Image (cartoon, rainbow, N blue to C red):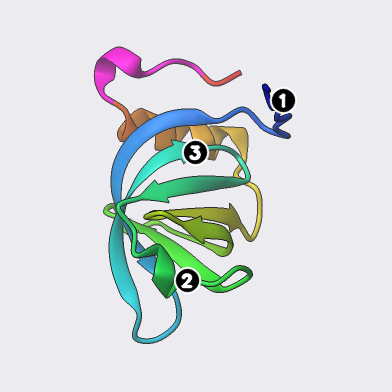
């Protein structure tokens, strides 16, 4: 049986090392592999360390911090919904630095 999932926002494949901070002094690394205007998916994460609705901050290597909360966490993955949606220009800038040059495309 095929399951149809309707997403509210387009997701983009990315590959960027991040730090996921979830309350003092928790700070763990991971790899952001999907990004949308409302959130991201992080792999290589200690998913057992996070709970649904837990406040977290996704810290990028450039110093940017994206506050949000955990939507789900399992099997080494963590889904984060940002506290406020990214503007399209912010999304475009993050995509520009989070993808190899051959995969960089304009965001519509």
User: What residue lies at 70% left-to-right and 32% top-to-bottom?
Assistant: 7
Q: Which residues are magenta?
A: 100-106
C-alpha span from label 2 to label 1? 27 Å
Q: Quadrant of the N terminus?
A: top right
Specify the farthest residue to the front.
Answer: 1
Mark seen at residue 35: 3
User: What residue lies at 30% left-to-right and 68% top-to-bottom?
Assistant: 28
- Is residue 43 shown above or below 96? below
What residue did someone put label 1 on? 4
Residue 100 lies left or right of residue 89; in this view the side is: left
Residue 10 lies left or right of residue 29; in this view the side is: right
Question: Is label 1 in a helix, a strand or a loop?
Answer: loop
User: What residue lies at 32% left-to-right and 34% top-to-bottom?
Assistant: 97
Q: Residues within 10 Å of mark 2 (few under 14, many from 20)?
A: many
What residue did someone put label 2 on? 50
2 or 1: tag closer to the N-terminus: 1
User: Which of labels 1 and 3 is toward the front?
Assistant: 1
- Is residue 86 shown above or below 83? above
1 or 3: tag closer to the N-terminus: 1
Question: Is label 2 in a helix, a strand or a loop?
Answer: loop
Relative image position of residue 105 (x, y in whole percent): 43, 15
Q: Quadrant of the C terminus?
A: top right
Q: Residues within 10 Å of mark 1 (few under 14, many from 20)?
A: few
Q: Residues within 10 Å of mark 3 (few under 14, many from 20)?
A: many
C-alpha span from label 2 to label 3? 19 Å
2 or 3: tag closer to the N-terminus: 3
User: What residue lies at 35% left-to-right and 80% top-to-bottom?
Assistant: 26
Relative image position of residue 42 (x, y in whole percent): 40, 50
C-alpha span from label 1 to label 3? 20 Å
């Amino acid at each position: 049986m095929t399951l149809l999932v309707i997403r509210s926002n387009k997701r983009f494949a990315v590959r960027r090392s991040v730090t996921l901070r979830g309350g003092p002094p928790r700070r763990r690394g991971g790899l952001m592999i999907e990004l949308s205007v409302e959130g991201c998916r992080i792999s290589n994460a200690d998913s057992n360390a996070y709970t649904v609705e837990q406040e977290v901050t996704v810290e990028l290597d450039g110093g940017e911090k994206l506050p949000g909360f955990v939507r789900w966490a399992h099997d080494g993955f963590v889904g984060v919904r940002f506290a406020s949606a990214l503007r399209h220009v912010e999304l475009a800038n993050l995509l520009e630095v989070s993808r190899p040059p051959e995969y960089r495309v304009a965001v519509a």
